[in-house]
Amino acid sequence: MSKFSKTLAVISALAIFIAGFTSCKNNDDDDDNKTPAVNTGFEGKYFNVHVINKLKTGAYSENTIPYAQCSVEEIIFNSDGSGTYKVVHEEYDGEEGSCSTTIISEYIAYTKSDSSLKFKLNDYGELEFTIESDDKLSGNGRTYEKYEIEEIYAYVNMTGMSNDDTSSKKVTSKAIILGKDGSAFIRNIESGFVSFAREPTIETQDIPGTYKKEGKSFTFTGEKSNTVITGKFSESDGRTYLKIGEEKYRKL
């Protein structure tokens, strides 16, 4: 082989080596430029069950339309700044005399600054919450509790809205909260129509216990009273329901 040919072969080999080295270096640079997920140092599942009963027109101004609401909410915060907001919400319009149910399940991106959490919802704008402790948030004038939630089933109901019997006008919101460890509790909030009161009395009842799911069957056993409640799961329009007696709970 001539001297020129040998020199050309060395140069070609060196060029291939350098090209390969440069290519690997560029891949490393690409990896370095990827934006990492933001670790907020905060995560958890929080829920709230509440009712609003403003059906007494005499206690408010003439321009105020009587209404009632009941809702079950769940907010999931992930440590990377993502999350999910879920709610089953029912509202009674006292003027139109009708009920409407809203089910929302929306992915969120939240920001954290000290003890403040903020995120936006498509239909409700920006919401802000304050971290009161690891187990409690406050926001919207309500308290949200932390629980290692496996599933939540919500039931909302309003009775006596179409008649004049004030004693039967009740707003009820219930939630069955199932924990990851097999524990569970039922929260029942009821607000009745109270005469001559600006804000009606609200009664809250919690029943702690345990639960079992076997196929489509559900069993809840109360901790103190040994109350046994059974129900059946069903699927409809891509949603899961739990029927207990005449009450049909929606899975959040």
Image (tube, rainbow, N blue to C red):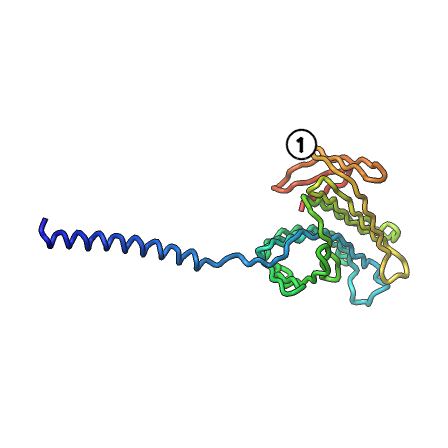
Left or right: 81 with respect to 144?
left
Crowd band around label 1 with a 10 angstrom C-alpha radius: few (<14), some (14–19), many (20+): few
The amino acid marked with disc number 1 is Gly
Residue under the point 81% across and 67% down: 62
Residue under the point 62% across and 53% down: 84
- Extreme residue in the right direction: 196
The x, y position of residue 8, in whole percent, is: 15, 54
Residue under the point 78% across and 57% down: 52
Q: Which residue has dot 1 on it? A: 215
- Extreme residue in the left direction: 2
The x, y position of residue 188, in whole percent, is: 80, 47
Residue 102 in sight here: no
Q: Nearer the viewer, residue 43 or 150?
A: 43
The x, y position of residue 35, in whole percent, is: 48, 59
- Quadrant location of residue 214? top right
162 relative to 199, above or below: above
The x, y position of residue 169, in whole percent, is: 84, 52
Q: What element carries label 1?
A: loop
215 relative to 237, above or below: above
141 relative to 106, above or below: below
Residue under the point 67% across and 36% down: 234
Residue 91 in sight here: yes
Left or right: 208 with respect to 87?
right
Left or right: 252 with respect to 188?
left
Q: Which of 213 and 91 is in front in this view?
A: 213
Q: Which of 133 and 100 is in front in this view?
A: 133
Q: How many labels does the image show?
A: 1
Left or right: 53 with respect to 72?
right
